[in-house]
Image (spheres, helix red, strand yellow):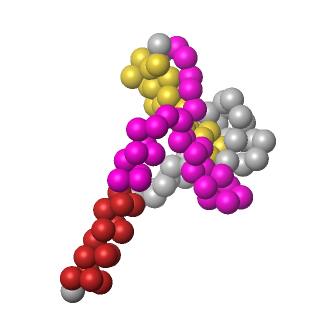
Amino acid sequence: AAIFNTSVTAGGTIQAHANSDTQPGFRMQSNDTHGWEFLHRGTEGDFALNRETGGTTTEVLRISRSTGDATFAGTLQLVVLQEWILQIVVFKWEVLVLG
């Protein structure tokens, strides 16, 4: 179970302390079978974002605490990331070559 910081003032932060591979530190739900889970994984300390659809929970993003590397589940996110990187490279090339 998460422990919430109750000493929050205006303009402060909300903290949820968790250390589990399966129990989220924070959860947002639209109903009992659909929502998002935020985990601080106990095994390696990674951040994980899970989605719940129809009562099934699936990890969609993991960020490694030790390296900072992000792993996405699926291909759409990687395509968007690659397109973003390509746009930056093309922009830098246009600035350098075309002035």
Quadrant position of residue 30: top left
Q: Is residue 33 above or below residue 37?
A: above
Residue 58 forms part of the magenta stretch = yes
State yes or no: residue 79 in magenta.
Answer: yes
Report the residue at 41% width, 52% height from top: 81
Location of residue 94 in the rendering, given as x and y in whole percent from the top left corner: 25, 76
Q: In x, y percent, where is residue 65?
A: 68, 55
Left or right: 70 in relation to 23: left
- Residue drawn at the location 27% of the way across and 83% of the way down: 97
* Residue drawn at point x = 56 percent, y = 22 percent: 57
Residue at far right of view:
43
Q: Quadrant of the N terminus?
A: top right
Q: Is residue 86 visible?
A: yes
Judge from the rendering whether residue 5 lies leftward or rightward of residue 21; answer left or right: left
Q: Which residue is nearer to you in this view: 12 or 93? A: 93
What's the residue at 47%, 13% (across, down)? 54
Taking the image as drawn, is residue 4 in sight? Answer: no
Please, which residue is most extreme toward the bottom here? Answer: 99
Count all numbered tags in the image, as a single digit.
0
In this view of the protein, which residue sits in the foreground, 97 or 18?
A: 97
Quarter of the picture holding the C terminus: bottom left
Q: Position of residue 22 (x, y in %)?
A: 69, 29
The stretch in magenta equals 55-83
10, 26: nearer the viewer: 26
Quadrant position of residue 93:
bottom left
